Amino acid sequence: MQAIQVTENIHSLALFPGSFHPITTAHLELARVALQRADRVLFVLPRSFPHKSYDHVTLQDRLDLIRMAIDDPRMSAGITEGGLFIEMVRECRRRHPGLYKIYVACGRDAAERIVSWDYDGIEPIDQQLREYELLVAARNGDYRPPPQLAAQIHPLPLDPGLDEVSATALRDKIRKGGDWEQYTPSAIRQRVSELYRRS
């Protein structure tokens, strides 16, 4: 896991994985809400996601956009070699063994996927959640975890007005010439325009 600066003696860290293609106002708000539970939030970009295409926007471009958008010293960004949440958590623990608790923050749709995923050759989700806990933002509906996992999965209240804000919608609006600026932090709008109008 690259570019992680956890120098203070912190108690808990929330990993926030995603492709961030690009980072949006909804991503930032989710991170802010996660800070109600964790001491720090780390935006985590997997080096590669299967079945994802980024056109000409590079991993470094997306990492730079996150760093430009972050407006809280309790937030940072890094790159991970892992693609699964459990791989990211273990990579983080190897680098920072003193962390007491690691959360993984995500939206409802991601939580539904990872809880029902077929982890062939890897521990099932109930065992994985002994090593981390999930923070799940309500997006387009609340997430209701299976009862046997409920103690390790915590809701993150998110403004319902952000439901329509997504990186996919942002890219689509840019492509079609729509009004997209409110979907992304003002600090990165010029750079987002430069990168994504070329896509």
Image (spheres, helix red, strand yellow):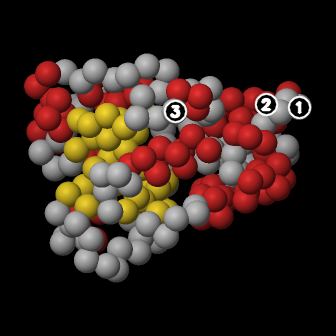
Q: Quadrant of the N terminus?
A: bottom left
Q: Amino acid at mark 2?
A: Lys
Label 2 crowd bin: few (<14), some (14–19), many (20+), radius 10 Å? some
Disc 3 vs disc 2: which is toward the camera?
Answer: 3
> Can residue 90 be seen here?
no
Q: Quadrant of the C terminus?
A: top right
Residue where numbered disc 1 is placed: 177
Residue furthest right as drawn: 177
Q: Position of residue 117 (x, y in %)?
A: 29, 26
Residue where numbered disc 2 is placed: 173
Foreground of the two, 127 or 135: 135
Relative to residue 15, is residue 170 drawn left or right? Answer: right
> Can residue 150 be seen here?
yes
State the separation of the CA atoms marked 2 and 1.
6 Å
Q: Amino acid at mark 3?
A: Asp
Residue where numbered disc 3 is placed: 159
